[in-house]
Image: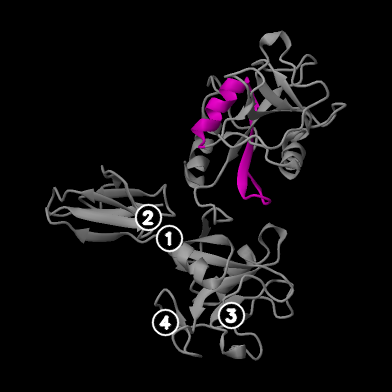
Amino acid sequence: MLSRLERILVLATLLLAPQAIALPVPLSPLILNTNNNHEYLLLKNAVWTDSEAEAALMGGNLATVRNQAEQDWILNTFGSYGGNQHLLWIGLNDTNVAFDFTWLSGEPFTYSNWAAGEPNNAGGVERYVAMYYPNFNQPGKWNDWTNRLHDPSGLPLNGVVEVIPAFPFVLTALMLNPGNNHYYLLLTNANWTESEALAESVGGHLATVRDQAEQDWIFNTFGSYGGQQRLLWVGLNDAAQAFDFTWVSGEPLTYTNRASGEPNNTGGIERYVVIYYPNFNQPGSWNDWSDRTADPIGLPFNGVVEIIPRLAVSRQNGAGLQFSWPIAMPNAVLEGTTNLSVPFSPVSYTLLTNAAAGTFSVATPASVPQMFFRLRP
């Protein structure tokens, strides 16, 4: 499965490609469905088979519809996208056996939304399923169709691509903080210890806050992400010794933003630090909490992961070099040059994934006495 960054790169390439391209290209950007944290986009007008081919190139499939909420979200998001009415190709089909409908994703067929009298496989050639457009007399209902471009009235059929993220516990794309050139991710709701474990699995840690500018950037970027007020786990904790707070990254504690009366270690179990949500009476201030997933009024705790685009290097036994960088940076490219007055260029290597360490690693021979390397995100 392609990562989100890889899919964005594919998407950008397709959008810039010549219009003579045979396969369909995106009509919309990737849009996050916050109900399931899957991403969707709308393709330009094309037949079902070409639409699915393009979906596969993006690391997904034509959409699977699992319940009424997902059905409604897809119809409301794409049915009249761009001000035009669209019939929406989804991944349901009976190409193997007539009336034996299956999802391209391989998921079980547990929900349906057929129009009256459908499916009917008219002429024995209707094998592909689409949702009707919002202005139809049965809006959003499903019909089986031939592998066609338009309905009889001339309205277009457009594929809805669904992409399930490679890291299902991540809510956002990598976000660059221009103040320090570090990358950040927002995790799904979890306690501190689980959030830190997930952060390490992608090659980072819960965020270190070094100054007011970084505090403000994290708070403004994630505090109400997706329209939801959130308490944000950061890497500060006193799990080893009460009131002796340290960053999980190992960096020194040089900046704090405590709420009034905090930290207080209520009950002797508050060992982990969060940033308060924007609507709190001390927005952005810090508090120590127990290892929990929600505050007393039910607001979620979400970990902020910090990814430092650091290139680690070690010498191999065969005199070659091994490089590694965070697994959350799948599009990063290792470049080298023998002379800093000469432009860097990509180095040839085979990329390996070390899931246990949360890194990618590559090995390259040391073929010259001196060479300079850099990681280009």
Would you identify the image quadrant in which residue 227 lies?
A: bottom right
Using a 10 Å C-alpha cutoff, classify the residue at mark 1 as few (fewer than 14 neighbours), some (14 to 19) or many (20 or more): many
- Left/right of residue 27 with respect to residue 4 in the rendered view: right
Using a 10 Å C-alpha cutoff, classify the residue at mark 3 as few (fewer than 14 neighbours), some (14 to 19) or many (20 or more): some
Find the distance from the CA under tag 2 to the CA under tag 1: 7 Å
Q: Indicate the position of residue 283 as horizontal and vertical percent values.
A: 69, 76
**Residue located at (20% from left, 50% from top):** 338
Which dot marks residue 252? 4
The amino acid at mark 4 is Pro
The amino acid at mark 3 is Ser
Q: Secondary structure at mark 3?
A: loop
Marked residue nearer the N-terminal end (4 or 2): 4
Q: Indicate the position of residue 113 as horizontal and vertical percent values.
A: 76, 32
Q: Which is more toward the observer, 41 or 21?
A: 41
Would you identify the image quadrant in which residue 285 lies?
A: bottom right
Which dot marks residue 290? 3
Task: Please name the residue that numbered disc 1 is placed on.
Answer: 201
The reply to whether dot 2 and dot 1 touch (C-beta < 8 Å) is yes
Extreme-top residue of the structure: 123
The amino acid at mark 1 is Ser
Extent of the magenta region: 30-59
Mark whose residue sits in front, 3 or 4: 3
The reply to whether dot 4 and dot 1 touch (C-beta < 8 Å) is no
Q: Is residue 195 magenta?
A: no
The amino acid at mark 2 is Ala
Q: Secondary structure at mark 1?
A: helix
Which dot marks residue 355? 2
